[in-house]
Image (tube, rainbow, N blue to C red):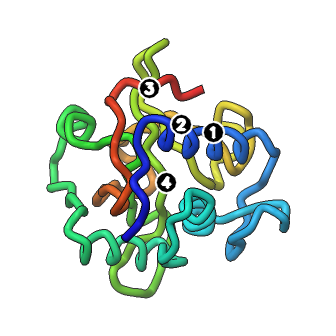
Amino acid sequence: MAPSVAGAGFDRLVAECQRLAGMGLRYQFGSGHPASGGLDCSGTVQYVMSRQGMSGMPRTASAQFVHLQEQGTLTLVPPGATAHWILSRARPGDLLFWRGTYATGRWPDVSHVMIYLGIDRRDGRPMMFGASTRTGKGINGHGVDIYEFKPVKPGGKGQLIGFGSVPGLNAPPRQWVAR
């Protein structure tokens, strides 16, 4: 059984996200360790969870999606879901899954994953952590960074299709200072 992470444990998760966000790492497809100078999205999630003592997190975004589905913790986002619907259900520490950020050629067609950090108490923005090719749009301007989470982006690249908690990772309150 995976260790429970709540309170101080969640603070450790956030501290790890902040540490990685401050390292100046780039998005690097196929990388799962910061020693290479960059990480990809699923490598970031796997690395962060392993640093929390949670082994068994699969390597790819689609396998992580299936893992949460098999654990019964995945919530699928219905067509037409509003940002309010998503934000009222997502919990800090949840993994966020997208399709359509690039053509995967596999099933399930999940192409991106990030970690939801919650609502920033200072300005009310929902925040997430992970690796993205949107360099310069994170709070530190790096590929591996903390980003504002915009659950619904009409006309944007990629579609949020699901989110779910990592087994053993207990959610803190929705409000959290993300930086």
Instruction: Identify the disc placed on residue 114.
Output: 4
Observer-nearest residue: 11 or 122? 11
- Counting from the top left corner in percent of width and height, residue 13 is at 55, 46
Task: State the quadrant of the N terminus.
Answer: bottom left
State if disc 1 and disc 2 touch (CB < 8 Å): yes
Instruction: Identify the disc placed on residue 176.
Output: 3
Q: Is residue 80 left or right of residue 174?
A: left
Q: Amino acid at mark 4?
A: Met
- Counting from the top left corner in percent of width and height, residue 70 is at 25, 77
Q: Amino acid at mark 3?
A: Trp
> Secondary structure under badge 2?
helix
Q: Amino acid at mark 1?
A: Ala
Q: CA distance from mark 4 to mark 3?
A: 17 Å
Earlier in the chain: of badge 4 and badge 3, it is 4
Crowdedness near tag 4: few (<14), some (14–19) or many (≥20) residues, C-alpha within 10 Å: many
- Residue at image point 31% right, 69% down: 68
